[in-house]
Image: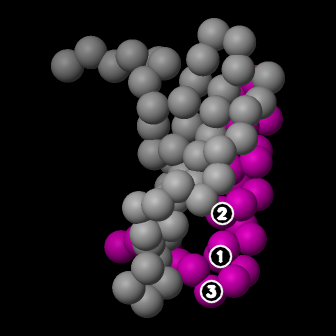
Amino acid sequence: MTINPTDPTVLWRLTRGRSTAHATIFPGPTQTTVTWFIDDVMDRAEQYDSLDLAMARADQIRGILLKDGWGERG
């Protein structure tokens, strides 16, 4: 199996009751896109000039959701 560093990657998955949330990152040559899905519906997409900024934003959203009662998907 070959792993391509530009393939989309799910960063995290959370649950709250029967609801699910996840973040996906799409690295690109000049910008990186991060998206958030709630119950498999895209809630938001944002683009950043670096992978580090996109990862930091995804981690920030994860933290907000955890404080709001979401939990790690088990």
Callout 1: 10 Å neighbours few (<14), some, many (20+)? some
Q: CA distance from mark 3 to mark 1?
A: 5 Å
Determine whether the residue tagged by mark 3 lies in a helix, strand or loop.
loop
* Residue under label 1: 66
Residue 48, compared with residue 31, is above or below; it is below
Determine whether the residue tagged by mark 1 lies in a helix, strand or loop.
helix
Q: Would you say the magenta stretch is mainly helix, strand or loop?
A: helix
Q: Residue 4: percent from the left, percent from the top?
A: 39, 16
Labels 2 and 3 touching (C-beta < 8 A): no
Q: In the current view of this chain or complex, which residue is farthest to the left?
A: 1
- Which residue is pictured at 51% across the width and 44% down the height? 24
- Name the mark on residue 69: 3
Residue 9, compared with residue 10, is above or below; it is above
- Name the mark on residue 62: 2
- Which residue is pictured at 76% across the width and 48% down the height? 57
Determine whether the residue tagged by mark 2 lies in a helix, strand or loop.
helix
Residue type pointed to by label 3: Gly
Q: Residue 67: percent from the left, percent from the top?
A: 72, 80
Does the stretch in magenta take in 55?
A: yes
Is tag 2's residue or tag 3's residue first in the polypeptide sequence? 2
Residue type pointed to by label 2: Arg
Residues shaded magenta: 50-74
Q: Residue 19: percent from the left, percent from the top?
A: 43, 79
